[in-house]
Amino acid sequence: MQYEGNLESLNSRPLPQWYDDAKFGIFIHWGVWAIPGFAPHLGNISDAFKKDYSRAVAMTPYTEWYANAIKVPGTPSAEFHAKEFGNRPYTDFKQPFEEGLKQWDPDEWAEAFRNSGAKYVVLVTKHHDGYCLWPSAVGNPHEKNWTSERDIVGELARAVRAQGLRFGVYYSGGIDWTFNREPLRTLGDFIGSMPGGDYRAYAMAQTRELIERYEPSVLWNDISWPTGFDELLQLFADYYNAVPEGVVNDRWVHEKLFSKLMRYKLSRHLFDYLAQRHIRKNPDAVSGVIPQPIPHSDFRTPEYTRFDTIQKKKWEATRGMSHSFGFNRNDTDTDYSPAETLLSDFIDGASKGGNLLLNIGPRGTDAGIPAEQLLRLKFFGEWLSVNGSAVYGTQPWRRNGSDNSDAETDGGVPVRFTRKGNDINIVFLGSPSGSTLRLRDVSLTGEGKLLDDGSPVTLRQEGEDLVLEFRTPLAGKFAPAVIVTTRD
C-alpha cells in the first residue's frame, strides 16, 4: 500500500508486527564526546533541573551534551575541559575519535547484541553536536568536514543485519549546535534553540539521505523537527513507502508559533520562571522525560521512566545503564543500575505493552564497550535465552479487566503477567525459593510449567488467591517464569 502525506492516510497504517513482538532493542550513543567522556555526577537528568535550574542544561549527566556544557563558565565540564584539554576547540576531538575506529569491530558488537537477546539496534547517527557518523553528501555550511570519513552507520547496519537483527537510526532533528552556537543553560534556552534558516533544508536532506542509503527499520528523531507540518507528513509517507515495515517515534513536534516565540529572550525568561515555579511546587512530579503526544507516530518514548499502566498506544522506554547515555569516564560499577533492576523494569514494561531500548555508551579512544555494560547485556541474554517466550511476541494480560495487572506473592515478591494466545506467563520480579508460592488476588486455571527446566507447576485456587506448587523447588534464581496454558 502506498501512503500519502496526510494524517488520514498515515494514521490508517497498522503498527508493524515485528516491532510490537521485538520487546528489546539496543540504543548506541557514540560520538566525539566519548573522547573527553565527562559529565557531572549530579544524579539523573531530572535532578539537574531540580537542583540547579539556572544552568541545568549544562549540568545534566549526559556526556553527549559536553559541547554545550563547556561553553558555560564555572560548570564542572568547563573546568574539566580547561584542566585536561587546555580549552581546545571541541572539534579537535574528531581526530582521536576517528583514530580509535581502527580498533572497532562492528561484527563483535553485533554478536554481543544478538547474544543479549535484543531484536533491533538503533544507532545515534548525529547528535546535538552535529557530528555525523557517516560520510554525508549533504555539506554542513557552518562546520566543514564535520562527518566521519568511515561509514560507521553502513558498517554497523551490515553487521547487525547479518546477525538477524533489525537496524534503525537516531537523528537529532531538533537541535544542532553547529547551526546555533548559543550556550544553553535553562529549559527555556533548550526549547528555544531549534535552528531555523538553512537548518530546515539541511535536516530534511540528511534524514532523507539516511533513509535512502540505509533503509532503517526505525526512524528515531529527537527533541523536535524544524520544518512545517505538511513537509513532516510527506517525510513520513515517503519513509513508509520506501521501508514498508519501518516505524517512527514521537519526538517530531514540528515548528509552531510557540517554538518561534521561544527564540526570543523575553519568552524564554517567562517560560523559565513558570517552569522553575512548577518544579519547586511539584518536585516529585518531575521524573524522567515523557514527550508530548503528536498527531502521528508509531510509538511513544518515555526516557528514564516508564508508564505504570497498560497503554493503548505502543511505547518504548529508553534509558542508559547509568545516568548518562554517552560514555562517562567517571562511572564505576556502583553508578550503573543493577542488572536485576534493569531486567525488572524491562519485564514490567513488557507486561504493559512496552519495549525497552537499552543504551550502551562505547568509549571513544578504542571503540570498546565498557565491561560493566557488557556484563548487563550478558545478564539479559542469559535470562532471555531461557525465558524469552514470556516476553517476545506477547501482549499484556488485563487481569479482571484492569489496565494494571500487577500482583505480588504473599512474601511480597512483585509479579507481572503477559499473554500469548491461550498462554499466560507469570514472571516473578525477585528471587523466590521453595515449593509453594501464593499469588494474592489472582484467579487462573490451566496447566503450568516452569520455563527454566520445563518441570510441571500445579495451580490451585484458594479463595481469591492462586497457589502455585512446584515439582522442582525454586532455588532463588532471579525472575523465574511460569507459563500457564489456560483451559478457556
Image (spheres, rainbow, N blue to C red):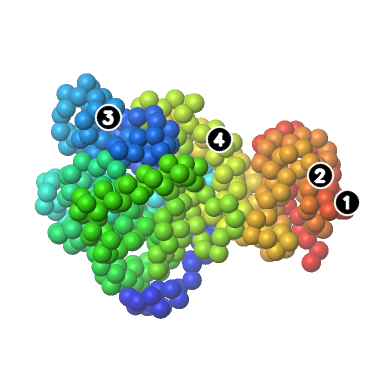
- Which amino acid is tagged 2? Arg
**Alpha carbon separation for disc pair 1 and 4:** 35 Å
Distance between mark 1 and mark 3 Cα atoms: 60 Å
Residue indicated by mark 1:
462
State the residue position of label 3. Answer: 75
Give the mark nearest the N terminus, 3 or 4. 3
Q: Residues within 10 Å of mark 3 (few under 14, many from 20)?
A: some
Q: Tell me, for residue 438, which label it has, or none.
A: 2
Q: Position of residue 30 (x, y in %)?
A: 32, 40
User: Pointer 1: residues within 10 angstroms few (<14), some, or many (20+)?
Assistant: some
Nearer to us of marks 2 and 4 is 2
Q: Amino acid at mark 3?
A: Thr
Residue beneath disc 4? 339
CB under 8 Å between callouts 1 and 2?
Answer: yes
Question: Which secondary structure lies at badge 1?
Answer: strand
- The amino acid type found where label 1 is placed reads Glu
